[in-house]
Amino acid sequence: MNAALRLAPAEDIGMRKTLARGCEELGVAMSPEQLHALLDYVRLIEKWNRTFNLTAIREPARMVELHLLDSIAVVPHLPRCARIADVGSGAGLPGIPIAIARPDVHVTLIDTIAKKTVFMQQAAAELKLGNVQVQHARVESFQLAEPADIVISRAFSELKDFVGASAHLLRPGGKLLAMKGLFPHEEMARLPASHQVCESIALKVPGVEGQRHLIVLSTIPQTGHP
């Protein structure tokens, strides 16, 4: 681990315990190296936040719960060896924590804001994440070299806009995963006729109050006319 990124020892120990306990509660196994990488990632966000305003959360300890564990909560619901596109990724959430927790997946981080993609590229390089690619692009007009199995978003837009902007990135049979707070009844009612909610999962994020939901969307199979 880069010594320059190491947190103050007391803070590091407390955050590491919170992170390790939270991952255990979520049922996500983490090696010591993965925990180190996640804490280094928090430190990078804190450092770059002073200039780039990546997130409104300033305290590293709160980032562990509100960013890391909130992102890792979706990991048990991801297929193995998937190709994942994280749209509107911002500071790399949830894509970078997913890539650290699941080295078997490949994650493409997509954002329209240049300073955020610069940060994500630097974070992926410093954390040596060979399974991460960063794209500075508008998702609506971007094309992946190989279609994704999963497109995920965290507070990116309402569901109908998420579908409209991102569905073209998926392979046939792929899924859109929207990370939400309150259960989005009204958004679901406004979904286009092409898509449906195939699963909704209530997430319990350790240390985080309030509701969290993972909404899984799929295309509606077209039925032929007799």
Image: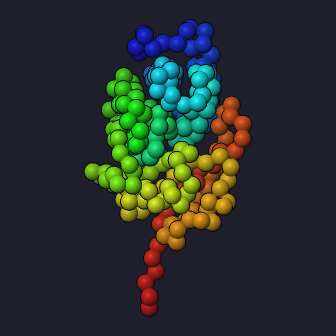
Using the image, determine if residue 223 lies above or below residue 125. Answer: below
Specify the quadrant that holds the C terminus: bottom left
Outermost residue on the right side: it is 209
Using the image, determine if residue 26 lies above or below residue 42. Answer: below
Asked if one can make out residue 196 in the rendered structure from this viewpoint, the answer is yes
Q: Nearer the viewer, residue 31 or 154?
A: 154
Q: Nearer the viewer, residue 141 or 10?
A: 141
What residue is shown at x 44% (from left), y 56% (from top)? 165
Q: Where does residue 224 sit, x and y in percent of width and height?
A: 43, 84
What residue is shown at x 35% (from left), y 54% (from top)? 141
What residue is shown at x 45% (from left), y 14% (from top)? 5
Using the image, determine if residue 171 lies above or below residue 50. Answer: below
Q: Nearer the viewer, residue 187 or 149?
A: 187
User: On the image, which quarter does residue 140 sit in?
Assistant: bottom left
Q: Where does residue 107 sit, x and y in percent of width and height?
A: 39, 41
Outermost residue on the left side: it is 145
Using the image, determine if residue 50 lies above or below residue 99. Answer: above
The way the protein has been coloured in the rendering is: rainbow
Q: Where does residue 104 sit, x and y in percent of width and height?
A: 39, 39
Q: Where does residue 122 sit, x and y in percent of width and height?
A: 36, 26
Asked if one can make out residue 129 in the rendered structure from this viewpoint, the answer is no
User: How many dots with numbers?
Assistant: 0
What residue is shown at x 34% (from left), y 41% (from top)? 135
User: On the image, which quarter does residue 120 sit in?
Assistant: top left
Outermost residue on the bottom side: it is 226
